[in-house]
Amino acid sequence: MPERASRDSAASGPANTCDPAGIQSAPVFDIKRYAISDGPGIRMTIFLKGCPLSCRWCHNPEGISPAIQKMYTESKCIGCGECVDHCPEQACELTDEGITTDGKLCTACGLCAQVCPARASEMSGHYETVAELMKVIENERPFFDQSGGGVTFSGGEPLLYPEFLCAALDACGKLRIHRTVDTSGLVSEGKLLEVATRTDLFLYDLKLMDSKRHEQWTGAGNRRILKNLQALAATGAEIQLRIPLIKGVNTDEANIGATAVFIAALPGPEKTIRLLPYHDVAGSKAAKLGQRHDRGSMTEPAEADLERIVTQFASHGLIAAVGG
Ligand code: SF4
Ligand code: SF4
């Protein structure tokens, strides 16, 4: 489909360089403290909003759009009508099914969330400057220092905001804080390699080796993602490959075999491989965003599937572990 094809190629434009003095704020939708699965030690993971992919299994659907979004949880709503009274756009309506929001009228001003006494209405995403973020990061330094941890920039896709990301990575580097970047790989090669000069560890997602199936399940082909991974590996960067395992999508022997062949041929130091079994948690978040979640053929892999996949990687000389 033309739209999807252009999303794959949009990230393949000229090799722009990062200008840390450029845009220095970005939309953040979550900050996770004491994270232990996004790199070494105890970490702070910062989730930037906006992603060039839209994976059907995405655990964080609120991270796909770069826009600030309203989220509503019907089970928390006490029907007080405060949001209806305060919405300047008359976008909220109290119905038998709770609050409905007219997306065409809503400007994401956040007033409904401010007045909601039950936190049934919330806003996902707020803009944060590098300076503001660094204050939060610096508070956690004792945990990083004691555990060998640091900061992980995730998303969404943190490389959608290269100036912000480079400035934040530079600021962390000055404080000798370990820096991890979690990327989908669907970014410009130039920006990726610029970011690599400021990054200690990459978490790099590999989903499907067949580009058409990749497009079918994530909204974009994988040509740029695979090419970027080869270019990044050639720099000698430390890379952990993360493979979400979704039965009915990518756990078949053909895809795992092709993935293993590709990884085994990558240049640079040995890569760690983490297998991340799919869990069906996207539905409840999609409902909060007023979106429909179609699970389709996606199911959670069984223990036997995981054992077979680990064995298949081992047959290519690769060590793959289950979990982040
Ligand atoms: S975010 Fe603002 S415009 Fe949108 S529903 Fe809430 S109060 Fe109304
Ligand atoms: S303000 Fe909150 S609790 Fe009250 S009706 Fe609106 S969403 Fe429900």
Image (cartoon, grey):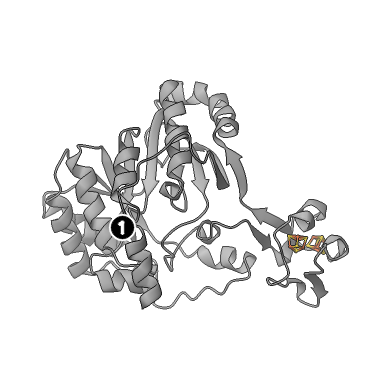
For residue 248, which quarter of the picture? Answer: bottom left
Where on the image, by quarter, is ligand 2?
bottom right
Residue 271 in view in this figure: no
Q: Position of residue 284 (x, y in %)?
A: 58, 65
Q: Nearer the viewer, residue 124 or 72?
A: 124
Residue drawn where x is 72% and y is 73% of the image:
102
Residue 79 in view in this figure: yes
Q: Nearer the viewer, residue 199 or 324?
A: 199
Q: Secondary structure at mark 1?
A: loop
Is 195 situated above or below 97? above
Say which quadrant the N terminus sits in: bottom left
Q: Position of residue 169 (x, y in %)?
A: 42, 33
Is 159 situated above or below 293? above
**Left or right placement of residue 317 versus residue 158 in this view:** left
Q: Position of residue 110 (x, y in %)?
A: 74, 55
Residue type at mark 1: give it.
Answer: Ser
For residue 262, which quarter of the picture? Answer: bottom left
- For the image, the number of numbered tags is 1
Q: Nearer the viewer, residue 10 or 180?
A: 10
For residue 58, which quarter of the picture? Answer: bottom left
Q: Position of residue 319 (x, y in %)?
A: 19, 47
> Mark 1 packing: few (<14 Cα in 10 Å), some, or many (20+)?
some
Residue drawn where x is 70% and y is 55% of the image:
122
**Left or right placement of residue 132 versus residue 145 in this view:** right
Is 16 situated above or below 174? below
Is 157 situated above or below 202? below
Residue drawn where x is 33% and y is 64% of the image:
8
- Whether disc 1's CB lies below 8 Å from ligand 1 is answered no
Quickly name the residue at label 1: 12
